[in-house]
């Protein structure tokens, strides 16, 4: 079983993926894993800005789906029964995941709640806990973000993540059961 996760930043994709890993032994890979490895090798800060810029540079220099090659290699090596591809943000990424048989889950939440999560975040990215609401909204207009609602409209499942973690986990469980 393969699940592709689509959603705005801090909508709950990573929480859903972590739950799938913990409860079901899922293998999880997302585009920022590859980007963050490259940023780390270059001794550059891991920030959304750097991920966006690096992702664009790689796509512009090589090919649109250059990062998919890294995702696909990791998926092939995994022996897990459930494989999760996170942070699908672009049409070509969506289509490649569907070609591999992924069922797409759109996880969304209101922008105010997502910004609140950023301010309370675990400091995974350089800007976590510091970005103003205005800058957060501005980042929603980046090329990597603006097509997400359209992808979500084509998803196989939709999760409104406005409640507790237990609520999110329950919604994920329902989807997993339906996919079995």
Image: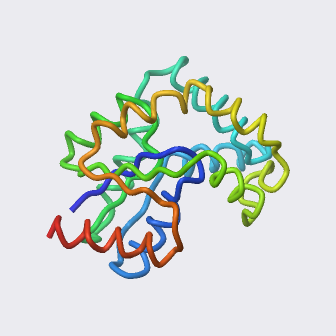
Which scheme is used to colour this image of the protein?
rainbow
Residue found at x 55% / y 33%: 145
Q: Considering the image in quadrants, where does the N terminus appear? A: bottom left
Spot occupied by residue 49 in the image (x, y as percentages of width and height): 72, 35
Residue found at x 82% / y 42%: 132
* Residue that extends furthest to the bottom in the rendered view of this protein: 23
| Quarter of the image where one finds residue 38 | top right
| 21 relative to 8, above or below | below
In this image, 136 relative to 151: left or right?
right
Spot occupied by residue 99 in the image (x, y as percentages of width and height): 20, 39
* Residue that extends furthest to the top in the rendered view of this protein: 60
In this image, 109 relative to 140: left or right?
left
Spot occupied by residue 157 in the image (x, y as percentages of width and height): 28, 52
| 180 relative to 140, above or below | below
In this image, 37 relative to 43: left or right?
left
| 111 relative to 116, above or below | above
Residue found at x 70% / y 50%: 115
Count of numbered circles in the view: 0
| 120 relative to 143, above or below | below
Q: Considering the image in quadrants, where does the C terminus appear? A: bottom left
Spot occupied by residue 31 in the image (x, y as percentages of width and height): 50, 45
Residue found at x 60% / y 43%: 35
């Amino acid at each position: 079983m393969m699940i592709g996760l689509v959603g705005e930043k801090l909508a709950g994709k990573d929480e859903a993926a972590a739950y799938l890993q913990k409860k079901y032994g899922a293998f999880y890979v997302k585009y920022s894993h590859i980007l963050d490895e490259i940023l780390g090798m270059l001794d550059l800060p891991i920030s959304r800005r750097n991920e966006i810029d690096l992702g664009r540079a790689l796509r512009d220099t090589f090919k649109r789906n250059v990062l998919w090659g890294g995702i696909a290699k990791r998926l092939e090596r995994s022996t897990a029964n459930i494989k999760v591809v996170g942070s699908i943000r672009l049409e070509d990424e969506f289509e490649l995941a569907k070609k591999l048989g992924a069922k797409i889950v759109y996880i969304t939440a209101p922008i105010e709640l997502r910004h609140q999560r950023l301010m309370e975040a675990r400091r995974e990215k350089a800007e976590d806990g510091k970005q103003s609401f205005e800058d957060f909204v501005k980042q929603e207009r980046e090329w990597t973000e603006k097509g997400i609602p359209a992808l979500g409209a084509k998803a196989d499942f939709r999760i409104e993540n406005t409640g507790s973690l237990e609520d999110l986990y329950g919604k994920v469980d329902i989807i997993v059961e339906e996919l079995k």
